[in-house]
Every structure is written in structure tokens, then in C-alpha cells.
Image: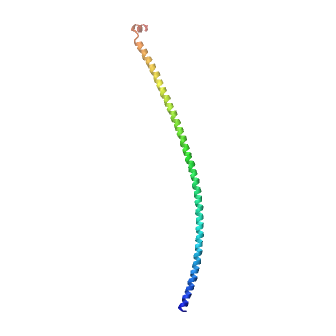
Amino acid sequence: MTDEELKRLLDAYAERIESKFEKRFDAVDSRFEALDKKVDAKVAELRSHFDTTVEHFDRKFDLLAEGLINLDEKLERKTSAIETRMEQGFAETHALIKFSYSELDRRVGATEQSIRAIEETPPALKRGSKR
């Protein structure tokens, strides 16, 4: 076999090998493209599901926040009502104590006046009252 025949034979083998590899690479490329499409579709599906889930949680958090605001307002109203009732009770207690002290002061004053009147009673009347 001559060099030229050997070269032609090697070139023919190289072409056949190259053709087979090209076909195989084309097949692998098309499979990767199909896989990419499937992955992209799954990613889009997952993103859609995730977005739906996030929206659901956002609504739940909004409801929770609204409930907490309502609870805070209710607690504020109750606290305010309790404070008002306590202030009224304290004012009534202070008024009652003031009245009691006034009444006590009046009674002590009347007792002191009675004692002074007794002390100012002439001695002759005091002796006569003993009989």
C-alpha cells in the first residue's frame, strides 16, 4: 500500500469517525435542549407555585396584622375605661374621706364646746348638781 492510499484510507476513516461523532453530538445536543426545556418548564411551574404560596402567606399575614391592630385598639379602650373608673373611684373615695373628716371635725368641735361649757359652769351649779 502506498502512502497515498494509506492517506486516503485514513482520511476515509477520519470522515466516518467524524460523521459518527457529529451525529452523536447532534443527538446529545438535542437531548440537552429537550432537558433544558423540561427544566425551564419545571422552574416556571415552581415559580408560579411559589408566587401563589407567597401571596397566600401575604394575605394571612395581612389578616394577622389586622387582628393584632384590632386587639390593640380593644385593649386600649378597655384600659382607658378601667383608668376612668379608677379615677372616678379615687375621686369618690377622696370626697368620702373629706366628708368623714369634716363630720369628725364637727363632732370633735361640738364635744370640745360641751367640755368648755361644762368647765365654765359656775362652781355653785356644779355642787348643786351633785345633790
The colouring scheme, among rainbow, by chain, secondary structure or one colour, is: rainbow
Query: Vertically, is 70 above or below 24?
Result: above
Q: Quadrant of residue 13?
A: bottom right
Q: Position of residue 29 (x, y in %)?
A: 58, 73
Of the pair 57 and 82, the residue shown nearer to us: 57
Question: Horizontally, is 111 left or right of 50 in the view?
Answer: left
Tally of numbered discs:
0
**Which residue extends farthest bottom?**
1
Quadrant for the C terminus in the image: top left
- Which residue is at a point 51% across and 34% down the rendered structure image? 84
Question: Horizontally, is 105 left or right of 31 in the view?
Answer: left
Query: Vertically, is 26 above or below 127?
Result: below
- Which residue is at a point 59% across and 72% down the rendered structure image? 30
Q: Quadrant of residue 69?
A: top right
Query: Vertically, is 115 above or below 4?
Result: above
Q: Position of residue 24 (x, y in %)?
A: 58, 77
- Which residue is at a point 42% across and 13% down the rendered structure image? 117
Query: Vertically, is 11 above or below 84?
Result: below
Q: Position of residue 81 (x, y in %)?
A: 53, 36
Q: Position of residue 16 (x, y in %)?
A: 58, 83
- Which residue is at a point 56% across and 46% down the rendered structure image? 66
Quadrant for the N terminus in the image: bottom right
